Image: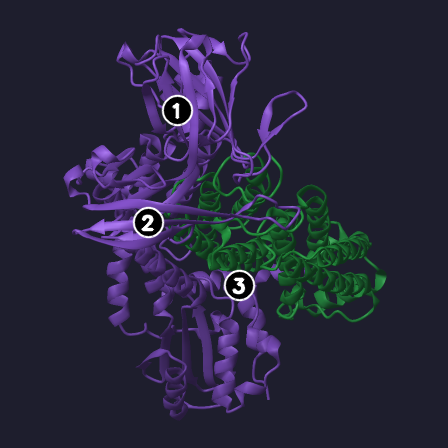
Amino acid sequence: MSSRSSDSAKAAKADAAAAAKVARDDAGHDPMRPSDHVDGTPQTEAAGGPRLGPVGWLRFAWRQLTSMRTAIVLLLMLALAAVPGSLVPQRSSDPNGVIAVRDANPDLVWLYDALQLHDVYTSPWFSAITILLLVSLVGCVIPRMRHHWAAMRARPPKTPARLSRLVGFQTVPGDASDVDRAEGVLRRLGYRTERYGDSVSAERGYLRETGNLIFHASIVVIVVAIVAGSGFGFQSQRLVVEGEGFSLSGASLDTLNTGQWVSADDLPGFGIHLDELDVVYETENVDAIGQPLDFTAFVQVTEDGDTHPGQIRINEPLRVQGSDLYLISNGYAPQITVTNADGTVVFDEIVPFLAQDNEMTSLGVIKLPDGLAEQVGLQGFFYPSAAQLDTGAYASYYPDLLNPLLSLQVYTGDLGLDDGVPQSVYQLDTEDMEQVAGRDSAEPALLIGPGETVDLPDGLGTISFEGIRRYAVIDVHRDVTQGWVLGGAIALVAGLLASLLIPRRRLWVKATEQGLELAGLARGEDPRLEGAVDDLARRLRGDDADDLPPKHRWGRATEPGRAADDDPK
Amino acid sequence: MPDVSWDSYSLLAVYSSMAVYAIAFIAFAFDVARRRDPAEVRERELVAAGGGTTTTATETPTRGPRRNLAKVGFALTVLAWVLHVAGTVMRGIAAGRVPWANMYEFALTSIAIIVGIFVFAQLWRDLRFLGVYITGLATVFLGVATVNFYVSPTPLPPALQSYWLVIHVFVAALGTGFFALGSGLSILQLIRSRASGLAYVDRLPGASALEDLSYRVSVMGFIFWTFTLIAGAVWAEHAWGRYWGWDTKEVWTFVIWVVYAGYIHARATRGWRGTRSAWLQLIGFAAILFNFTIVNVYFKGLHTYSGLPE
């Protein structure tokens, strides 16, 4: 026996827009929302009107900044502002790319610098958008927090005078004596209830707003934690050859970046010795031969006078004294000795070569400023598995050491080390040098296998390729706030789930002469509100709520004020 | 150890599913192009005359011959999807791991998820009017994936050897699936709010009903995307030593997240509801497609797992 009146349903639809408005004015208004929020109080005073004093202007500006419209525009600006950083190489993530782009486009360097396109994410314009967005967020959220705090302890609002204008309005048989029962049903369904005469007012879903506020607050926590983390942390890198080690001090590291509240003295005092870097390559799958499958660095950690072994793998950093050690890259380092014409050893070092491709063709430089008749620079490739191409040039065909070969060009002249300009050990400045062996000279490049010794040109001496070791590049860093960032992120997800999936709604049951009147009101998105009123009606009639067709349980995609235009016209 | 025969069966299944998707697309396209038939016009007039029904157009009964083409299209879509999933699973068997470790595999899996969400959404709502969009998308994307992105199964590089591969990438695909469905609904919303006269458009639910559906689906996408972002950060911290480094893929994942955050705000803002928020939805989905194709293939970064030769 359905007592749902199609007439009143029709009436409710017909002027649903007006109904929603009235309903909000009656009970559903949310004064703490920005004025342009669909649930907010529409702005009535003439903003920017004739008599607006300085305070008025400030209030006007603040209201603009914390409005929904501004939030949307700022979000879109933030999205747009993040894009250039993916188009132009960034110093933070791709320093070599930055150099390459600047070399390739000398005419655009001024533009890159003027717009800070190589440091987009730390640039003032990107920060400005972020800060405005955060201020807008805080300005919007804090009043809502206060309001929500009060709302959570307030009683559900008074029952509106005319329920017939609200969502899902219907009447079930009953009288004033059934209101107690209705209140019990609503309470069991998780509603907070309040009696107003012969009616009960119920509200649920406070967690929706709580979740929304937690979500926004988490964003602030995450941003603050990130900023603080960069101030209290440090980041350093060191290339270390097998059989060698380093300690965590400024002098022993290749790079060291400390936050502004950290000094080099605050670095943890431990040492790392690399025993072996174990690399496994694919050997069977014909489509992937030579693809690395595993990198493991076996190290000895020395701390507090005690030494213990450890391992670093990709995806498995090693944690020592609150700092994390990562395996960043790897390569080969030939051991090279150079002897002058008198037979004196003038150079005996393990020289790291930088890998250039997946087959580990590696580029390296040796500088010999002293001990020979003139300054000598060597530059060339190391091939772990050398094969000669048809052109006569060499290439590596496999990344492991199947047929190691060094191929070096020799330069003589001025290495440029005395100019006072710092030079990279991986680059040879050949401007003031002359090639004496290699493609551009009469003599061919030197080809040296492991254990071999060959003569340098012009009777300068000899060079030997004594052996080969692997090296690892190890990143050591500490980020004291990353736990906060993670905590913020978890809270953010929890808040998001609550704010998007928990419906906030009000239901009313009112005893009238016709029976018990039922209706609901959505606060925020609530596509199942009508279903919820139907469900309540069924429970009050004593029907079994479980054997319903699924359609009804899902409810319908209608919302106050929005259903009218769905009707076939 | 990769198994060549499993991979060839997988390809066979994927090609077959493409063919069936294409036929399903044609069936749906004929359904779209069909003119209003007299019986329907009569019924509509009756409905209009009867007035006060609360039935929305989404729930218009599907009896009679007039929905037959859509029915055929949907049945074919289900068949194609089963073949597609079988192909994806066999690819996983061939590679001996989850089938989403390079661009081809990710395309395979995420398109299967897009269609899967469409198919299962049918239990919730009659969304067959989206069939032409979804099957068209699936046919074109699978075509692009098999022709341009295909690589033989290879073992995982060390950076991908992590359980986060299973979580992070799969959730990203799920988010993409929901956003794809939402984008179809937003496109129809924009069409519905403007043009009229085409029988197919008139049969659609109202623009605001489409907007509601799109919003509900996109919100699911946003939740999964948020999770993708966070899981990715946790994994990046393990693999690369920092949870966020503005790598190109990270930038675009962030951009997409921010655009959809804007979309969700737009839905709750006077003057932004309706057409404007629909455009934001579509900008977000365009950014997803850009992120997957252009960023993967042409941008330099740490997420270089396309497996394509450089």
Residue density around tag 1, few if under 14, some if 14–19, many if 20 or more, within 10 Å: some
Residue A15, numbered label: 3
Q: Are marks 2 and 1 in contact (CB under 8 Å)?
A: no
Q: Where residue B26 appears, x then y in whole percent?
A: 81, 53
Classify A336 as above or below B72. Answer: above
Q: Is residue A302 left or right of residue B118?
A: left
Q: Is residue B180 left or right of residue A156?
A: right
Q: Which residue is mark 1?
A: A426
Q: Where residue A432 appears, x then y in whole percent?
A: 39, 6
Q: Which residue is mark 2?
A: A299
Residue drawn at (44%, 62%) of the image: A500
Viewer-nearest residue: B289 or B283: B289
Name the element at disc 3: loop
Q: Where residue B25 appears, x then y in whole percent?
A: 77, 54
Q: Amino acid at mark 3?
A: Asp
Q: Are marks 2 and 3 on the same chain?
A: yes
Residue drawn at (75%, 49%) of the image: B197
Classify A375 as above or below A154. Answer: above
Name the element at disc 1: loop
Name the element at disc 2: strand
Q: Quadrant of the N terminus of chain A?
A: bottom right
Q: Amino acid at mark 2?
A: Val
Residue B189 visible in the shown view: no
Chain depicted in purple: A
Viewer-nearest residue: A220 or A138: A220
